[in-house]
Image: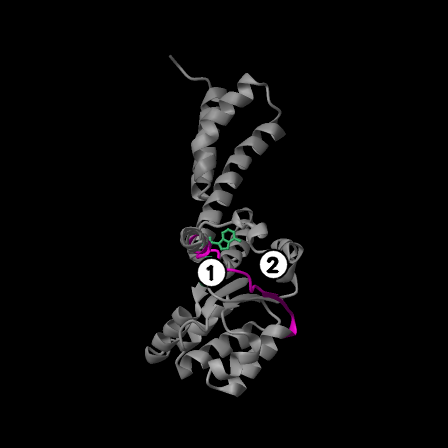
Amino acid sequence: MSTSPAQMSEARRYAQLRAHLSYLKLNDAFEALPRVLDQARGENLSMTAALERLLEIEVEATEARRLAARERFACLPEPWTLSDFDFSAQPGVDEKLIRDLATLRFLDDASNALFVGPPGVGKTMLSVALGRAAVDAGHRVYFTTAAELAAKCHKAALEGRWKSCMNFFAGPRLLIVDELGYLPLPEDGASALFQVINQRYLKSSTILSTNVGIADWASAFGDATVAAAMLDRLLHRATVVGIDGPSYRLRHHQSHAETLRQGVNARVS
Ligand code: ADP
Ligand code: MG
């Protein structure tokens, strides 16, 4: 059977179109092309509708890839979201304040958030939930503990990579530094953290969680001047959330202990 010139050029055009999509690395559109062309024919789609359907497939796949890459980069330790946080278990936490933080408005003016409180009250959970919201909204987020940050900077200094390490910590739109004060920071750790905070100051937001009350920072970080300078940058534009309620982690132990105690009391009386 012979092919007419019109059919020939149509076949060539189709091959060209596939080649263009492949050259532009629009792989999902490339894969979907035959299906979308069939749909266009079958549903009598307009040219605009068919093109829109094809590109929508590529856009959705790109969004999913970018989200996955942001998630991998962020290193959030848990899949927590704000809906996992039980506000009634921690009545000291101002729900409105947290919901306002979750709008991510604070990223726009590069302000910070500080969670201060004893272990188990949900500081990490709230930081992670805000981090997750920022990742979902398309922002670059990075989660680390203060000890990890100090160790990374220390290693980078030894290996002559100080500048690139500082650039790394300057990069994310939101940096989360967890567990400041849980472990004593070595001297160069406190100064590395200060430099990280200082270079982010007024440029991008940091969430920091600590068990050390702000009044005790000077003694906790050894160097009162570094502590004061760090607090100065952090608090200039910041939401401070003090959580002093009971440990959520221990509440079952506590209620268990309470039951045991009541049991003993009941037997005694
Ligand atoms: P912190 O960082 O203050 O030590 P975490 O955020 O790690 O505390 O919380 C400790 C544990 O308790 C986690 O498993 C967390 O999911 C849970 N938790 C803490 N507060 C709440 C809360 N208000 N609602 C639900 N789970 C909570
Ligand atoms: Mg924690």
Which residue appears at 52% of the width and 53% of the height?
129
How many numbered markers are drawn?
2
Q: Measuring from the top left, give residue 174's x and y in whole percent.
A: 54, 62
Q: Measuring from the top left, give residue 140's x and y in whole percent.
A: 51, 58
Give neighbour class at mark 1: few <14, some 14-19, many 20+ (Cα, 10 Å): some
Q: Secondary structure at mark 2?
A: loop
Which residue appears at 53% of the width and 67% of the height?
117
Q: Measuring from the top left, give residue 226's x and y in whole percent.
A: 52, 84
Q: Which residue is mark 2?
A: 93
Amino acid type indicated by mark 1: Gly
Magenta residues span 236-254
Magenta run includes residue 248: yes
Q: Say the numbered circle drawn on residue 120.
A: 1
Residue nearer the viewer, 227 or 52: 227
Whether residue 93 can be seen here: yes
Compared with residue 136, is residue 235 higher up or lower down, i.e. above or below?
below
Amino acid type indicated by mark 2: Val
Which residue appears at 48% of the width and 43% of the height?
64
Residue nearer the viewer, 27 or 256: 256
Compared with residue 136, is residue 10 higher up or lower down, i.e. above or below?
above
Q: Are marks 1 and 2 in contact (CB under 8 Å)?
A: no
Whether residue 139 can be seen here: no
Disc 1 or 2, which lies upstream in sequence?
2
User: Is label 2's Cβ within 8 Å of ligand 1?
Assistant: yes
Give neighbour class at mark 2: few <14, some 14-19, many 20+ (Cα, 10 Å): some
Compared with residue 200, is residue 260 higher up or lower down, i.e. above or below?
above
Indicate left or right for 188 with 82 as reference: left
